[in-house]
Image: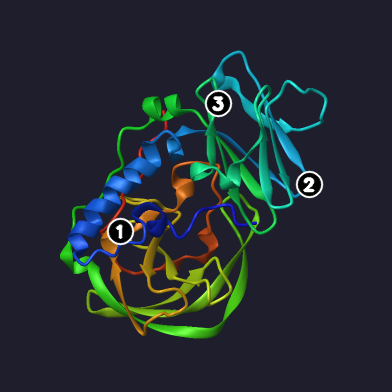
Amino acid sequence: MRLWLYPLLALLLGASAFADPRQEYDAFRAAMNQHAGGPTGMYAIQDATVIAPGKSARLRPGAKPADARWAEDGGKSDAATRLEYRDGRAWLRVPGRERIDLLRAPEQQHALADGLIVRATAYEDSIKAWLYNPTLSQRRFRELSFFPYDASGVVEGKFQRKPVPVGVSHLDSRNHTGLMYWVGDVELPLRGKTYRLRAYNKEKDWNKIEAVLLFVTDRTSNKTSYGGGRVLEAHFAKGQPPAAMRFNLNTLYAFLCAHSDYYNCPIKLTTRLDTALEYGEKYPPLLK
């Protein structure tokens, strides 16, 4: 099951292309801070659970909103808030209200009366139900740290596409089996040396692929950047990867599991680079 969210830059920055790499970096920093500390940000996650087709989960209430958690739905109480995954719909049933399909709701989320927010994310064989408490990010998050912008981090890589993406099964950061698709290789020039990296995507159909993802560790890992690895993305028109791609290393970001244990990250797919990539996101702040 693919329970982490990549590619992220397109999600954060939208479809707009930034001609100026510095503007892209500034927008990236602002969007990453919002993604981390917003009401449904990484530091606001209170709980999450996976729901298989035909199954449901109920929200187990606590004495305070901060105590609420997802639980397996035994169907014993009609007073509980439930989320059911059936026929491609994520039906949220709140007592006394009309049911809502979260997958078709604005931003796939719904605010509950107690201030908590429920959101659903669809995957091939399941949905992931997220429970957010905005007060958590207010208490736990200040801002992310980034290396200063460096123009030397804007490089052109050569991409060799695989005609048919190759599925790669791997164990992720939560010891679950994940699946990524090896879509080609990138030759990336860095400080006088050219590195060859595998490029991945979560899609296996070239008609749906519009980005390559490089998973890397380097000499900053476990020192000034997250030890598990960081992600570098390059985007293009869907199904039309160019032979030469611009990579902005200033937009390197840490695997999402650096910020929350509720993410599954592909740490076994990283390439170790024998150089210090002092670009992009630094080591994440400690949870409080």
Q: Quadrant of residue 134?
A: top left
Q: Residue at x 25, y 73 (%)?
A: 155
Closer to the observer: label 1 or label 3? 3
Q: Residue at x 78, y 46 (%)?
A: 54
Q: Earlier in the sequence, mark 2 or mark 1?
A: 2
Could you tell whether 82 is left or right of 197 in the image?
A: right
Q: Secondary structure at mark 2?
A: loop
Q: Is residue 185 shown above or below 53?
A: below
Q: Is residue 27 shown above or below 136?
A: below
For residue 172, say whether it is visible: yes
Dots 2, 1 in contact, CB < 8 A? no
Q: Which mark is residue 54?
A: 2
User: Which quarter of the rendered picture does the C terminus lie within?
Assistant: top left
**Residue 104, percent from left and from top:** 57, 47
Cα gap from disc 1 to disc 3, whole angstroms: 34 Å
Tell me the amino acid under the disc marked 3.
Leu
- Residue to which mark 1 is pinned: 251
